[in-house]
Image (cartoon, grey):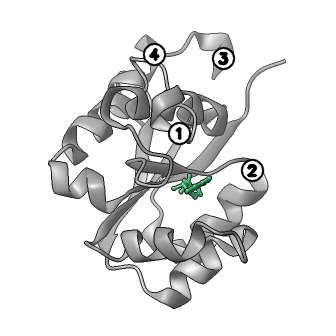
Amino acid sequence: MPNTKEKTLIIMKPDAIHRGIVGEILDRFEQKGIRPVGMKMLKMSDLLLDKHYAQHKGKHFLPHLKKFMKLLPVILVILEGLDVIRVVRSMCGPTDGKNALPGTIRGDYGMSTSANIIHSSEDLKAAKREIGIFFNKNEIFSYSRPDIHFYYAEDEL
Ligand code: CMP
C-alpha cells in the first residue's frame, strides 16, 4: 500500500537555538527529501505551552520543561512528506538523548530527557492538533520540489 503524504510539527527547542544547530537540523530533513511547508520563530508563553503539553498536565517534569522552553525563542517547522510523522520521529531518536543512537538528532546532540533539542509530533492526531495551535491555514504552503523524482520512485508518489 502506498504511504500517505502527511504533515508533522517539529519544534527546535531553546537548546538548539543556543547551540547554533538550527540550520544543521533543518538540513538533515531537507537532505532526506522532507519539505518544510511552514516555519516561524516565537517565544513560548504559558498559554501556548499548556496547550501544546496538555497530555503532560500534572507530570513532575512539566514545570521544569516549561521553564526551559521559555528560556529563548523556539523555531517551529511544519514538515511534509510520505509517512513523515514516523520518519521524522525516527530521525529525532527517543526522548532521552542518552538512549538515542548516533545518527539521530538527539543521539548526536543530546544527553538529557527534558532538554532534548527537538520535539516532533507523536501521531497524526497530535500533528493536526499541534499544527493548529501554532499556525493559521494561510501560514502553511504547498509547492513541489523539481527534484522530487530523485527522492521517490514514480509509484510511491
Ligand atoms: P517532547 O518531544 O517535546 O515531548 C514532551 C517533552 O517532555 C519531551 O520532549 C521532553 O522534553 C519532556 N519529557 C518527557 N519525559 C520526561 C521526563 N521523564 N523527564 C523530563 N522531561 C521529560
- What residue would you read off at disc 3? 156
Residue 151, label in figure: 4
The answer to whether mark 3 and mark 4 are in CB contact below 8 A is: no
The answer to whether mark 2 and mark 3 are in CB contact below 8 A is: no
In this rendering, the label closer to the viewer, 1 or 3: 1
The answer to whether mark 1 and mark 2 are in CB contact below 8 A is: no
Asked if residue 44 is positioned above or below residue 123 in the image, the reply reads: below
Tell me the quarter of the image containing the C terminus: top right
* Residue type of the residue flagged with mark 1: Asp
Within 8 Å of ligand 1, the CB of disc 1? yes
Quarter of the rendering containing residue 52: bottom right
Q: Report how far apart the C-alphas of labels 1 and 4 lie in the structure.
A: 30 Å
Of 104 and 29, nearer the camera is 104
Query: Residue 148 location in percent, x, y?
Result: 43, 23
The answer to whether mark 1 and mark 3 are in CB contact below 8 A is: no
What secondary structure is marked by label 2? helix
Earlier residue among tags 1 and 3: 1
In this rendering, the label closer to the viewer, 1 or 4: 1
What secondary structure is marked by label 3? helix
Query: Residue 6 location in percent, x, y?
Result: 65, 43
Is 118 left, or right, of 84 in this rendering? left
Q: Quadrant of ligand 1?
A: bottom right
- What residue would you read off at disc 2? 124
Q: Report how far apart the C-alphas of labels 1 and 2 lie in the structure.
A: 22 Å
Quarter of the rendering containing residue 17: bottom left
- What residue would you read off at disc 1? 96
* Residue type of the residue flagged with mark 2: Leu
Residue depicted at x 48% and y 34%: 92
Q: Report how far apart the C-alphas of labels 1 and 3 lie in the structure.
A: 33 Å
Query: Residue 128 location in percent, x, y?
Result: 69, 62
